[in-house]
Image: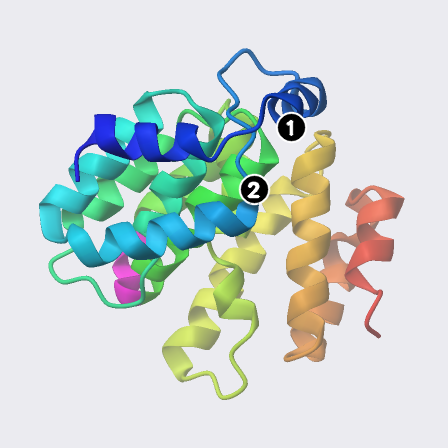
Amino acid sequence: MNTEQAIAQLSALGDIETAAKMQNIFKIDRAYLGVSNGDIGTLYKEWRKQVDGEARTSLAAELWDSNIHEARLVAAKLLTQARINPDDHVWAEITRWISELDHAVYADAACGAGARRLMAHPDRMAEVSRWVESEDMWMRRSVMTITLPLTKLNNPKADDLAHRDQILSWMGELATDSEWLVQNAIGHWLATLSKHDAPRMLSFLETFGADLKPFATKEACKFL
């Protein structure tokens, strides 16, 4: 499986009318093939069986760089896997994508892949910490999106709790961020945390709630 073959398979499943609707929805200047999510899911699972290791990372990188909507989604799916060892090349590729984001759908896909790599090697939190002060809104938003799995642990260990506190401190710095997508990401992160660790979530709101946009606070409290 190479990039040309992969794009050809994607193109064969495309639909012109659907592609036009996608172009109208996303309003970003890139190619849209009109492939359904179901077909994308079938393809990436087959490709993961055919390509492994650094070859898979290279394929994902080239698909991302093709600037085709569906190819970018497949690229992220190819690298979304719990166990990859070694994975430094995968982490490097995913963080490259995060520096190039321009829409939430790609951000969520890339961060979904990156979250697995972060959970596998929590020392990468040091790199994520630098995104807090980034001028790029998407990198600031990714602070919450890529760390979301840490909110869902039912039996967190001491290190997990320390990481939660670390992320909450970063969100405290971002609480005054005026970007809607950043505020929404904070609200969603806190809402998810509230289902597993309500005291920490409420403590955050007590300290930083006045800095958040009202809609973000409402989102944070929706499960309480």
Magenta-drawn stretch contains 123: yes
The picture places residue 140, in percent across and down from the top left corner, at 53, 36
Residue marked by disc 2? 36
Q: Quadrant of residue 200?
A: bottom right
Mark 2 and mark 1 residues within 8 Å of each other at the beta carbon: yes
Question: Which residue range is magenta in the image?
Answer: 120-124
Magenta-drawn stretch contains 180: no
Secondary element at tag 1: helix
Q: Nearer the viewer, residue 159 or 66?
A: 66
The picture places residue 69, in percent across and down from the top left corner, at 48, 28
Secondary element at tag 2: loop
Horizontal relation, residue 33 to residue 100: left or right = right
Residue marked by disc 1? 18
Quadrant housing the C terminus: bottom right
Quadrant housing the N terminus: top left
- Residue found 43% across the figure and 23% down from its top: 68
Q: Is residue 197 above or below residue 107?
A: below
Task: Give the amino acid at mark 1.
Answer: Thr
Identify the residue at the far top of this view: 29
Horizontal relation, residue 89 to residue 169: left or right = left
Q: Quadrant of residue 213?
A: top right
Q: Nearer the viewer, residue 181 or 34?
A: 34
Horizontal relation, residue 134 to residue 127: left or right = right
- Residue found 20% across the figure and 62% down from its top: 84
The picture places residue 214, in percent across and down from the top left corner, at 88, 46
